[in-house]
Amino acid sequence: MHVRIIRRAVRSAALAAAVTGTLTWAPSATAQSAEPTPPSQAPTENSAPEAGSIAITKKDPSGDLLAGAEFLLLDAAGQEAGRGKTDTQGELTFPELAPGVYRLKETTSGSPIHDVVADQEVIVTPGGTARLTITDPFKAAQLVLKTADDKTGKLLAGSTVNVGSGDTTLLTLTTGPKGTASGELPISSRTGHFWVQQIKAPSGYNLYKQKKTFTAAPGAPVTVTVTNTKSVTNPQPDPSDKPTSKPSTPEGTPSEESTAGATPAPTKSSSPEPRSSNLVAATSQDDTPPSAPAAEGSLASTGADATAWIIGGAGLLVTGGIAAVIATRPRRSAEASPTDADATS
């Protein structure tokens, strides 16, 4: 009997052990599949990202490497993140940069004939290197244009020219009141070859039609002079200077129309009452009346000779004088006869 009791106890213990083992295995299998354990190589949340860098190579438009160019690097907050200068190979590197966006500024080109480039943004990635090739342009030449008279050298306003290189027009300039104009001439090489052509001449001058060539260096002043020749024009007569069709006559002188074809009437002499003493004295000295004073100026030629009329008028005057003398003689005889009679008586 004791044996049976022991066998039943063993069976119960075994059954309980089997049930317990099933209950503990199932939940562990479900939890393991839902949340896998992360690998040991993954970084933790507190680890910093890998740093990056920026590498610069500096050149000019001719392909020459430029040393001595200075750069300033600013982070997204505007704080300085680096500063440096290119070496003899034209290279500069900013290492150990946190990933992000940076602004690169060129503060000086390190060359008197090169200009700086505009600011630019650079993106740095974790563990990467941002490589940049920066080309500094040549400085523009300072062009001064003059237009002058080819004979006197006087500077002329109102001259318009095109300035270019090859088939490209780079500038259009017009001279001002002082006869000059200026502008910045872009250059792409250490020695630039250019041309200038006049498209509008100053007022009163001929157009300079030929292209004039010249050279210019980066950053250096250059002066170009275009000369013009005065245009020759036939002067138009001034209407106010046009001569009249008929010559003017002096005041008081008969005009050509009044004398041509007309017979001048003899001048009537108004003889005063004949007085024997005056008239006899006048006729006794000279029977020819005094000639009239010549009029000032010159008479226009009429084709008729006035000498005959003058002689005829003088003859009438002489005849009238003689008749007056003859008429006065009987009076004197009549007046004298009574006196003689008285003397006789």
Image: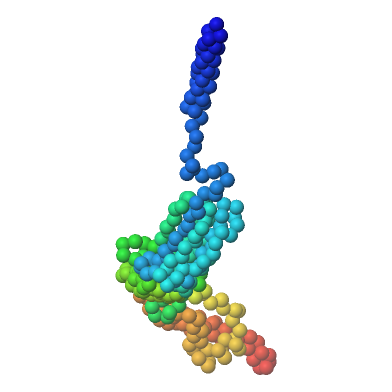
State the residue at coordinates (43%, 79%): 153
Q: Tell me the quarter of the image containing the C terminus.
A: bottom right
State the residue at coordinates (48%, 50%): 126
Q: Where is residue 230 in the image (x, y as percent from the top left)?
A: 38, 73
Can residue 326 be spotted in the picture? no
Vertically, is 64 above or below 81?
A: below
Q: Nearer the viewer, residue 296 or 14?
A: 14
Q: Nearer the viewer, residue 271 or 33?
A: 33
Residue 174 occupies quadrant:
bottom left
Q: Tell me the quarter of the image containing the N terminus.
A: top right
Q: Which of 313 and 8 is in front in this view?
A: 8
Residue 235 occupies quadrant:
bottom left
Vertically, is 89 above or below 296?
A: above
Scheme of image coloration: rainbow
State the residue at coordinates (54%, 60%): 73
Q: Position of residue 283 (x, y in %)?
A: 53, 89
